[in-house]
Amino acid sequence: MRVLIVEDEHRLAEALGQVLVRNNYSVDLSFDGNDGLYQALTGIYDVVILDIMLPGLDGLSVLQQMRQEHINTPVILLTAKGDIEDRVRGLDSGADDYLAKPFQASELLARLRALARRKGEVQVQGILAFGDLELNPHTLELWVGANSCQLTLKESQLLEILIKNPGHAISTTTILMKVWGYDTTAEDNHVHVYVSFLRKKLAQMDSKAKIKTMRGLGYLLVLDPERPASPALVAQASDQSMPPGSVLEMPWLQPTAQPTQNQEPPQC
Ligand code: CA
């Protein structure tokens, strides 16, 4: 998840940024309203944390211009304690939530998780799911059934974008901006490499999900209905028509035909 913090108090902005980065969010900082609006209008953010009192352009004007430009990124407003008028104007202008200063970082993290739940993107405990995949974007753990795999931060962020956009091909440019940032010097090839890393891990975990390349459009996460049955199922089906002992003549079937209690998950 990529978060933009627009806050002119540098120490507060940087402290918030560090907390979010420690929780595996990607963070960009902006210290004035005009720059904040410019960055928010890129549309690459999952959430914008927006202070109201800003130099250049105030937070409510930033919010109003975002909505006028049809940027529907969820916005959490930072308001002065007790300033009910600002909160009402903020919510009326299209803010999704607000936090009154001073606040604890844990409260901000809870608000971010609540926003994601409201958007219907996560199940319990902050888990994103697609087919047989379950991704925890905060611990970077990927599960397929009982098998788990530790992803790198960029692999997790890339998979998160694909899971959150079912049925939509996501362009290499969008992935570059959302994972590497809008001012990145990374190139398309970086995306292709990380897609190949993820494809290997999905295959190692025997997931039904796969990343399809849509020529000229980008990448799409799909469930593979054509995937052949696993060797274990082939072995069970074959057992019924073959004389006893035949399976032993096909050594490649044995590891899955005779699973053990302590079978190791695939290496990731
Ligand atoms: Ca301020």
Image: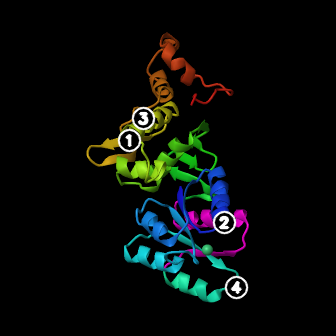
Image coloring type: rainbow
State which image quarter holds ligand 1: bottom right
Q: Is residue 84 magenta?
A: no
Residue placed farthest to the left in the image? Answer: 216
Q: Which residue is mark 2?
A: 108
Disc 1 or 4, which lies upstream in sequence?
A: 4
Q: Are marks 2 and 4 in contact (CB under 8 Å)?
A: no
Q: Is residue 93 above or below residue 70?
A: below
Q: Regarding mark 1 in the picture, which secondary structure is present there?
A: loop
| The C terminus: image quadrant | top right
**Of marks 3 and 1, the one in the foreground:** 1
Disc 3 or 1, which lies upstream in sequence?
A: 1
Disc 2 or 1, which lies upstream in sequence?
A: 2
- Could you give the CA–CA distance between mark 2 and mark 4, rounded to whole angstroms? 18 Å
Disc 3 or 4, which lies upstream in sequence?
A: 4
Q: Which residue is mark 3?
A: 193
Label 3 sits on what residue type?
A: Val
Q: Which residue lies at the image location 66% right of the left edge and 50% below the top edge?
A: 22
Give the extent of the magenta segment. Answer: 94-121
Q: Which residue lies at the image location 58% right of the left edge and 28% below the top edge?
A: 267
Count of picture labels: 4
Mark 4: C-beta under 8 Å from nearest atom of ligand 1 = no
- Could you give the CA–CA distance between mark 3 and mark 1, rounded to whole angstroms? 10 Å
Query: Where, by quadrant of the figure, is residue 101 drawn?
Result: bottom right
Q: Position of residue 150 (x, y in %)?
A: 60, 38
- Could you give the CA–CA distance between mark 2 and mark 1, rounded to whole angstroms? 33 Å
Q: Regarding mark 4 in the picture, which secondary structure is present there?
A: loop
Left or right, 103 with respect to 178, comes to right
